[in-house]
């Protein structure tokens, strides 16, 4: 039986993907705090020794834990995201983990198609939007995005030097359909609405892309791909995600918002 650890399991994406795997996979969720509605193991990714001990013996680690706000300051993202990710990668190498699925972010490439001079990280141009491939060179839009770029580099380094299998997912904006409708309904800015329509990652597709990233045989290593739904207005390419991971998205923000 394959054994998969999920760090940051208490977050929105973590909670969603807990049900992504079949009965032949043992999933162990980890979170920094206890929750009444979630049975998790406690893990602080900033504590290297704790991480080394907790993750030993797993086949795959899906690493979601970290500071997740684009508004986070440098000290926070450096400690939690960069150092925390290095601790997970160290644990993978030392503990015999075969693969790490790293949750990067659209904010690692957030300057592509941003309005010129715009500081809002969830607003994009209303003009032409150039396609952004799954492994496009990083162009972060914040310290948060820059920390994800650093973590992508670390993960690729461990793949090349230690032979660790690495799948990096540049995740879009995970929302339930209901939350997507409510979020867009409260917007009065076309640039923000376009961002939501383009970057949406729905629940089904969130589960599918993480399941595929954790379980399929990889045709190459390391892999960096976009994780968004098949939105009509997307500009992040999912061609590579479909080809390399067998991702089969079903959800579309236009179908949710325009019905």
Image: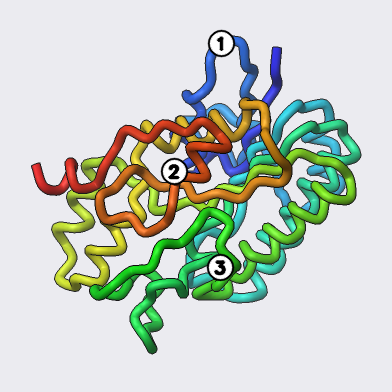
Q: Residue 162: x and y, percent?
A: 89, 45
Q: Earlier in the sequence, mark 3 or mark 2?
A: 2
Residue 199 in view: yes
Q: Earlier in the sequence, mark 1 or mark 3?
A: 1
Image quarter of the N terminus: top right
Query: Can you say whether 70 is above or below 222 in the image?
Result: below
Q: CA distance from mark 1 to mark 3?
A: 35 Å
Q: Earlier in the sequence, mark 1 or mark 2?
A: 2
Residue at screen point 81% across, 55% down: 157
Q: CA distance from mark 1 to mark 2?
A: 22 Å
Q: Residue 151: x and y, percent?
A: 69, 59
Residue at the left extreme of this rendering = 259
Query: Can you say whether 225 is above or below 209 in the image?
Result: below
Residue on which the image places disc 1: 23
Q: How many residues crowd around disc 2 within 10 Å: few (fewer than 14), some, or many (20 or more)?
A: few
Circle 3: element type: helix
Residue on which the image places disc 2: 12
Residue on which the image places disc 3: 145
Residue 46 in view: no
Mark 3 vs 2: CB contact within 8 A: no
Query: Can you say whether 19 is above or below 190 in the image?
Result: above
Q: How many residues crowd around disc 1 within 10 Å: few (fewer than 14), some, or many (20 or more)?
A: few
Q: CA distance from mark 3 to mark 2?
A: 19 Å
Residue at screen point 61% across, 55% down: 66
Mark 1 vs 3: CB contact within 8 A: no
Residue at screen point 36% across, 59% down: 235
Image quarter of the C terminus: top left
Decide if residue 163 is on the left or right side of residue 175.
right
Query: Can you say whether 107 is above or below 32 in the image?
Result: below
């Amino acid at each position: 039986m394959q054994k998969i650890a999920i760090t940051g399991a208490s977050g929105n994406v973590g909670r969603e993907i807990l049900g992504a795997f079949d009965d032949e996979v043992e999933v162990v969720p980890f979170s920094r705090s206890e929750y009444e509605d979630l049975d998790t193991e406690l893990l602080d990714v900033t504590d290297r020794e704790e991480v080394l001990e907790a993750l030993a013996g797993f086949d795959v680690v899906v690493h979601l834990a970290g500071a997740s706000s684009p508004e986070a300051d440098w000290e926070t993202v450096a400690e939690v995201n960069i150092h925390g990710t290095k601790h997970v990668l160290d644990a993978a190498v030392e503990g015999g983990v075969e693969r790490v699925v790293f949750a990067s972010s659209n904010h690692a490439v957030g300057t592509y198609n941003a309005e010129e001079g715009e500081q809002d990280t969830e607003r994009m141009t209303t003009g032409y939007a150039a396609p952004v491939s799954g492994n496009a060179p990083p162009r972060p839009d914040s310290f948060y995005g820059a920390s994800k770029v650093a973590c992508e580099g670390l993960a690729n380094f461990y793949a090349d030097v230690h032979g660790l299998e690495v799948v990096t997912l540049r995740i879009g904006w995970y929302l339930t359909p209901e939350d997507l409708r409510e979020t867009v309904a409260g917007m009065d800015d076309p640039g923000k609405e376009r961002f939501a329509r383009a970057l949406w990652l729905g629940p089904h597709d969130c589960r599918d892309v993480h399941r595929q990233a954790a379980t399929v045989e990889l045709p190459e290593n390391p892999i960096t791909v976009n994780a968004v739904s098949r939105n009509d207005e997307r500009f992040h390419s999912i061609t590579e995600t479909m080809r390399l991971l067998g991702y089969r998205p079903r959800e579309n923000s236009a179908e949710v918002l325009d019905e």
